[in-house]
Image: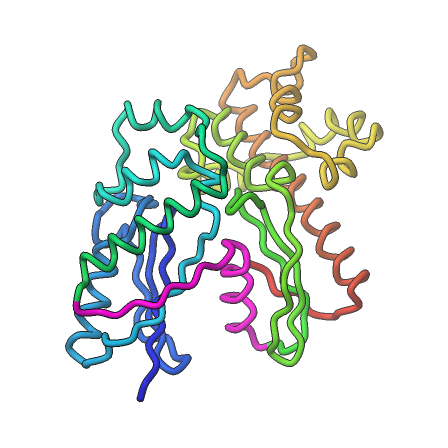
Amino acid sequence: MPIPVLGIHIGHDASCALLIDGNVILALQEERFSRIKNHTGVPYHSLSYILSYLYQNNLHKNLQVAISSTHLAYEVNLFALLHRLYCPDGVLPFWIKAASRIPSLLPLKLNEIIWRYFLQQKLASLYPLTSFTFAFYHHHLAHSASAAFSSPYSDAVVLTLDGRGDGASGSYSTISQRCLADPAYIASSLSLGQIYAEVTRYLGFTPNRHEGKVTGLAARGNPKNILFSFYPLDTLGFTNKILSNFNIARFKNLLTSSNGAYQLYSSLYNVFLAGFLKVFLGKIFLRLSSNLLKTLQYIYLILS
């Protein structure tokens, strides 16, 4: 009998995928249904579409469910999480956003247990004809698996980098003979994605949404105009330290330093800053990836 596996991503860019006997049958992005860019929350429309397919093909009786976020409660206040669970439009009201900034009085582990319980109960109540078996996986393990198992390489280093997820901003592991090793995680304080988000914010755009506009600006800017100002900082070891003890607050200070080199006062400067950001993060990425390949003694790199 075919074995269906339903993958669910709950959070930023919510989505679902259906695999049957290891083959991808459906992959759906919630924003295509809700028309809300980067839809955040539970992908109810995508779930309903996939469940209707399973019902039609009589494959809904014993459904394995893999959820890609283990520690959502580490990233978002439990109150906001539960609101997203019971409010399917994916948009948080202002008062919920304000309440979500209040630190939870419950231990993080207990937050996670409560969140998982309500999530499983909600899905079971929505689809009573389906028997679910739930498994939770780390955000970056899901990234690693999707990149590694869809690549042509059977032996390689697997590197994931993003803003943050499950308390980490990335991970690195290896795949050998199509077997993926448990990843080591990169702390959120070292997030290259958050650097990009901060610059996006300083340029007047919305972080975690308009980074593509910054990328577009980068193509028109000469990074040397800012790199020359940045070199004295580099001699102090900033570029090296960014991989070991980087924090967003320090980068904010650089952007607003009193010497004027990082003051965002003109559209021309914004273009230069975008070009600089592309080059600077590119250098960090190349250094990180080459060090991984050299240290782990692999030839190929799989990136997510």
| 302 with respect to 82 (left or right) | right
Pick out the residue farthest to the top: 258
Q: Is residue 24 above or below residue 2?
A: above
Task: Look at 63% across and 43% down and name the residue there.
Answer: 187
| Magenta-drawn stretch contains 134 | yes
| 282 with respect to 140 (left or right) | right
Q: Is residue 162 above or below residue 50?
A: above
Horizontal and vertical percent position of residue 116: 37, 51
**Quarter of the view holding residue 47:** bottom left
Task: Look at 45% across and 33% down and name the residue there.
Answer: 106
For the image, the number of numbered tags is 0
Q: Is residue 212 above or below residue 66?
A: above
Quarter of the picture containing the N terminus is bottom left
Give whichever of 106, 266 is nearer the camera.
Answer: 106
Pick out the residue farthest to the right: 235
**Quarter of the view holding residue 228:** top right
Give whichever of 202, 149 is nearer the camera.
Answer: 149
Q: How is the image coloured?
A: rainbow
What span is colored magenta in the figure? 129-152
Quarter of the picture containing the C terminus is bottom right
| 299 with respect to 141 (left or right) | right
Give whichever of 204, 172 is nearer the camera.
Answer: 172
Task: Look at 80% across and 68% down and name the residue there.
Answer: 297
Give whichever of 105, 265 is nearer the camera.
Answer: 105
| Magenta-drawn stretch contains 77 | no
Horizontal and vertical percent position of residue 55: 17, 74
